[in-house]
Amino acid sequence: MAMGFGGVLFFLFAAYRRYAWIWIALSLITGIAGWRIAARWYRHTVIPWDERRKKAAEEIQALKVKCKM
């Protein structure tokens, strides 16, 4: 949101600032790169960890049921 707000300000003052378009391009590139890195991290770290956690919880429940018998 902050980068979007900054981008709007740069567009508004582009006529007054000679190199404003460079900052806009860098902001967009940085934002897209951050989004891609975060999405990749979520797919490769968070989701598999959650699946392993669920399997471990199921195994613990199975052991608890087995021990009560």
Image (cartoon, rainbow, N blue to C red):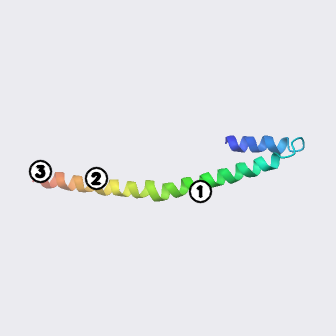
The amino acid pointed to by label 2 is: Ala
Quarter of the N terminus within the rendering: top right
Q: CA distance from mark 2 to mark 3?
A: 17 Å
- Earlier in the chain: of badge 1 and badge 3, it is 1
Task: Please tell me how crowded label 3 is: few (under 14), some (14-19), or many (20+) other residues with Cα within 10 Å.
Answer: few
Q: According to the image, label 3 marks what residue?
A: 68
The residue where tag 2 is placed is 57
Secondary element at image label 2: helix
Whichever of labels 2 and 1 marks the residue nearer the N terminus, that label is: 1
| Mark 1 or mark 3, whichever is nearer to me | 1
Q: Amino acid at mark 1?
A: Arg
Expressed as whole percent of the image width and height from the top left, the position of residue 4 reads: 71, 44
Tell which of 8 and 29 is nearer to you: 29
On the image, the x and y values in percent for residue 64 come to 17, 51
N-term-proximal mark, 2 vs 3:
2
Q: Which mark, by number, is residue 36?
A: 1
User: Neighbour class for label 1 at 10 Å: few (<14), some, many (≥20)?
Assistant: few
Circle nearer the viewer, 2 or 3? 2
Horizontal side of 13 relative to 29 (left or right) equals right
Disc 2 + disc 1, Cβ < 8 Å: no
